[in-house]
């Protein structure tokens, strides 16, 4: 595969693929050879718009001899079965977050990966942004002393009542969709698993969480996490230590904007960058064995276990349903 363009098959005529992954794969030198879609007509229109030659069923795409890497952009509950199918067909897998709906599901993927010898990674693109990498470096170097408190929030108003994220059976809910980001960053920064002190959640009348607030402890570091489908768009992350504060106001989604890392009153500015393309480029280098995979499935298992802990501790807050 050295020197050749890696060939990608996409599962789902998904919004996120059109907005971010298709341009990212192309920017990173990948070639998109097939699209899997449940509806051939809709798939054809999407493929035409995005200059993809072939539309097929999901199964045909994962078994396509011309596909090296399968990208899974399906709703959350479809990630596990299609990641297993792709690994079994000998494909590498880049799958949207959250990779699964539980840590035991990641165990199945780890077992499949061992048998089939292919790579799989959870597509948390924000981790590849230079501002996030700098945040890690500053914390590691002791720029703020020992971290004592982390605060992370991510939310928006999910207006469309037909969105799959309102369906419990499809892996819906604000925690899975947006809460996973601050929890991931807290875990990565502290290197610890969360102890859950309390979690308050508001649910729709169909039992899907639309606002969650958690009080957590990662080793010696206390943490507050908020996420929502029922508030105006917001995102923020800060780490407080004995000697200072680091803050990023757009830590998770920032494709076309400058990102500012605040160190007290001092701003470090990062020009707009496509973190999706940085993630895809890294995954392709790992597939070519040019570098080690930075986030293997063991990390995805830690993330899924952290999510499980928060989910298990959720208590209804009694707030009105949306
Ligand atoms: N990394 C990021 O920045 C980011 C951002 C947004 C979303 N995501 C993740 O990407 C994934 C897709 O998100 P999206 O917003 O792009 O979703 P979407 O466009 O609503 O749906 C993605 C695909 O899921 C399938 N699907 C949708 N509704 C379904 C239903 N009711 N039953 C069966 N299949 C259904 C469809 O496949 P067909 O086309 O085959 O019908 C659809 O194309 C999610 O896991 C999400 O968490 C990541």
Image: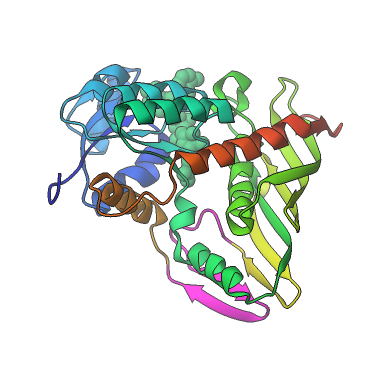
Q: Nearer the viewer, residue 120 or 67?
A: 120
Residue at image position (64%, 43%) is: 179
- Does residue 76 show up? no
Residue 47 is drawn in which quadrant?
top left
Position in image of residue 70 (x %, y %) = 30, 33
Q: Residue 110 is drawn in which quadrant?
A: top left
Q: Which residues are magenta?
A: 250-271
Please state if 35 lies on the left or on the right of 189 as rendered: left
**Residue 271 placement (x, y as % from top left):** 43, 70
The quarter of the image holding the C terminus is: top right
Task: Determine whether, in the image, residue 147 is placed left or right of residue 28.
Answer: right
Q: Is residue 17 above or below residue 82?
A: below
**Residue at 53% of width from left, 69% of height from top?**
137
Residue drawn at x 17%, y 31% is 53
Give the x, y percent position of residue 199: 79, 39
Q: Nearer the viewer, residue 1 or 166?
A: 1
> In this orientation, does residue 211 appear?
yes
106 drawn magenta = no
- Determine the residue located farthest toward the right in the rendered image: 318
Q: Quadrant of the N terminus?
A: top left
Task: Indicate whether residue 255 is drawn in magenta.
Answer: yes
Look at the picture and state if 171 lies above or below 182.
above
Q: Is residue 124 left or right of residue 3?
A: right
């Amino acid at each position: 595969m050295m020197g050749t363009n890696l060939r990608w098959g996409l599962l789902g005529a998904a919004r996120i693929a059109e907005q971010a992954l298709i341009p990212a794969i192309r920017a990173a030198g990948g070639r998109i050879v097939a699209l899997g879609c449940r509806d051939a007509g809709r798939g054809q229109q999407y493929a035409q718009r995005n200059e993809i030659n072939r539309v097929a069923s999901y199964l045909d795409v994962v078994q396509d001899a011309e596909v090296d890497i399968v990208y899974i952009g399906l709703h959350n509950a479809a990630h596990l079965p299609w990641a297993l199918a792709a690994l079994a067909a000998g494909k590498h897998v880049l799958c949207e977050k959250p990779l699964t709906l539980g840590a035991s599901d990641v165990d199945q993927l780890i077992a499949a990966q061992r048998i089939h010898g292919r790579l799989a990674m959870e597509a948390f693109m924000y981790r590849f942004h230079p501002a996030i990498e700098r945040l890690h470096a500053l914390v590691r170097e002791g720029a703020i002393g020992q971290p004592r408190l982390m605060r992370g929030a991510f939310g928006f108003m999910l207006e469309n009542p037909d969105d799959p994220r309102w369906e419990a059976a499809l892996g819906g809910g604000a925690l899975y969709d947006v809460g996973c980001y601050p929890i991931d960053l807290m875990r990565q920064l502290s290197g610890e698993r969360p102890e859950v002190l309390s979690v308050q959640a508001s649910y729709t009348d169909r039992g899907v969480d639309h606002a969650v607030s958690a009080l957590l402890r990662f080793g010696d570091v206390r943490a507050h996490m908020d996420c929502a489908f029922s508030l105006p768009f917001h995102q923020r992350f800060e780490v407080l230590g004995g000697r200072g504060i680091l803050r990023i106001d757009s830590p998770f989604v920032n494709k076309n904007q400058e990102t500012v890392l605040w160190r007290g009153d001092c701003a470090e500015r990062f020009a707009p960058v496509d973190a999706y393309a940085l993630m895809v480029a890294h995954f392709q280098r790992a597939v070519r064995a040019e570098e080690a995979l930075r986030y293997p499935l063991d990390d995805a298992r830690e993330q899924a276990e952290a999510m499980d802990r928060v989910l298990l501790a959720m208590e209804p807050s009694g707030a009105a349903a949306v």
